[in-house]
Image (tube, helix red, strand yellow):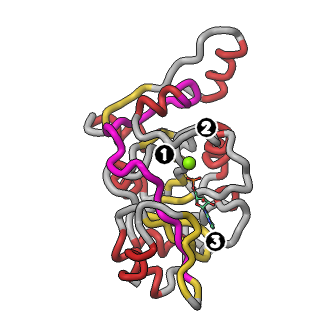
Amino acid sequence: MASADRQDDRSTGAPAPMARVLRADDPHALDQAAELLARGDVVALPTETVYGLAGVSTRSDAIARIYAVKRRPSHNPLISHVADMAMAERYAHMDEMSFRLAQAFWPGPLTLVLPLRRDAAGGAITPASTAGGDTAALRAPRGFAQGLIARLDLPLAMPSANRSGRISPTSARHVLDDLGADLSLIVDAGPAEIGVESTVARVRRDGIDILRAGVITPEQIAEAA
Ligand code: AMP
Ligand code: MG
């Protein structure tokens, strides 16, 4: 059901329909998530860190919907998720050191801030997703999300699937309780494997900045660099 219909339901006093929850190993989960995302809708997905609210990074309609559902301030940019390094290089410029770090930690919970490719074939990551900046934060997740991204062959912007300011969800139940009335699909892969956000890093000429602490430590990064 389209999101506008759900809002109408609420304005007429009828209870808003809740999201469907499909298990990640349900053969329909991948198909239905791919179909919704391909037409610009958003879907809640499991990743190894926390549950994410996904939309195609190159579509400004999908990105606007993520910000609206989360009630997230538009100046806070989103992390885009890619299937692998080849896909990252389609959307951003990877220096040698970032490439080495991606090789060491992807798929996994390291996000790298990289200069955006504005000329990406098939469309760049939309400025709405980077808060208008000229960099993109990229990482490759593990599991269901990785398979889905590979199948779509498109990057997915995916902040945590909670209302802005609330705790990041580590189960499908948390997502359902917080955002269920605003979504049509939540994919459930059980409790999140890690339960903590990715580390966000940026390689500079004179070192590596950790922009957000996360599950991968500065020591692990220094060792791999
Ligand atoms: P979350 O709010 O959990 O989705 O976390 C996203 C994190 O990545 C926030 O700390 C953002 O500030 C950071 N981030 C996303 N995109 C960029 C970017 N282009 N440059 C720097 N930090 C970014
Ligand atoms: Mg969050």
Residue 103 lies, in percent from the top left, at 35, 76
Name the residue located 64 percent from the left edge and 42 percent from the top edge: 164
Q: Is residue 73 left or right of residue 193?
A: right
Quarter-of-image position of residue 126: bottom right
Q: Which residues are magenta?
A: 178-203
Instruction: Compare marks 3 and 1 and give the one earlier in the sequence.
Output: 1
Instruction: Compare marks 2 and 3 and give the one earlier in the sequence.
Output: 3
Q: Secondary structure at mark 1?
A: strand
Q: Residues within 10 Å of mark 1 (few under 14, many from 20)?
A: many
Does the CB distance between marks 3 and 1 fall below 8 Å? no
Q: Amino acid at mark 1?
A: Gly
Q: Residues within 10 Å of mark 3 (few under 14, many from 20)?
A: many
Q: Alpha carbon of mark 1 to alpha carbon of mark 2: how far? A: 11 Å
Q: Mark 3 sits on what residue? A: 135
Residue 197 lies, in percent from the top left, at 47, 54
Q: Magenta stretch containing residue 47, yes or no?
A: no
Q: Mark 2 sits on what residue? A: 163
Q: Mark 1 sits on what residue? A: 52
* Residue nearest the observer in this picture, 145 or 225: 225
Q: Amino acid at mark 3?
A: Thr
Whether 218 is drawn above or below 188: the answer is: below
Q: Alpha carbon of mark 3 to alpha carbon of mark 1: how far? A: 21 Å
Residue 90 lies, in percent from the top left, at 50, 72
Quarter-of-image position of residue 114: bottom right
Instruction: Compare marks 1 and 2 and give the one earlier in the sequence.
Output: 1
Q: Magenta stretch containing residue 198, yes or no?
A: yes
**Ligand 1 has an atom within 8 Å of the beta carbon of the residue at disc 3:** yes
Residue 182 lies, in percent from the top left, at 58, 29
Quadrant showing the N terminus: top right
Quadrant showing the C terminus: bottom left
